[in-house]
Amino acid sequence: MDTELAGLEEKLAQLVQRLNALRAENRELRQQLATRTDENSRLAEKLAAARTRIEALLKQIPETET
């Protein structure tokens, strides 16, 4: 009975350790996701601004008649 209990305690300790490791990994992944999401938004804004500038420049180019 004591050996069974000791085995269960060991398995439970391993399970708790794994749970804590997964929680830490999950926290880190969430932080990485937030960073990448912010970066993606920033790059999308820069792309939109570049698109607007290019469109404005294209409007300044006179059309040639053929």
Image: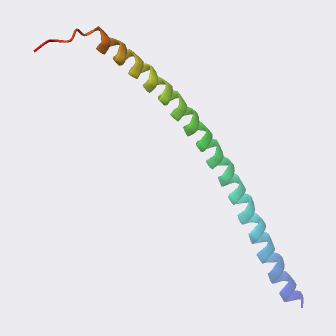
Residue drawn at (71%, 65%), measured in percent from left and top?
18
> Residue at the front extreme?
66
Please provide percent x and percent y for residue 12. 80, 73
Residue 10 x/y as whole percent: 79, 76
Q: Would you place residue 43 above or below residue 58 in this image?
A: below
Q: Is residue 6 above or below residue 22?
A: below
The image quadrant of residue 7 is: bottom right
Left or right of residue 66: residue 45: right
Q: Quick check: 65 above or below 44?
A: above
Quarter of the picture containing the N terminus is: bottom right
Q: Does residue 14 lie above or below 31 as drawn?
A: below
Q: Residue furthest bottom?
A: 1
Q: Is residue 8 left or right of residue 53?
A: right
x%, y% of residue 64? 16, 12
Label tally = 0
Colour setting: rainbow
Quarter the C terminus occupies: top left
Residue projecting furthest to the right? 1
Residue at image point 59% right, 43% down: 33
The part of the image, by quadrant, that contains residue 22 is: bottom right
**Looking at this view, is 63 or 44 the one in front?**
63
Percent coordinates x, y for residue 27 in the rendering: 69, 48
Name the residue at the left extreme: 66
Seen at 87% across and 84% down, the residue is: 5
In this view, the residue in front, 44 or 59, is 59
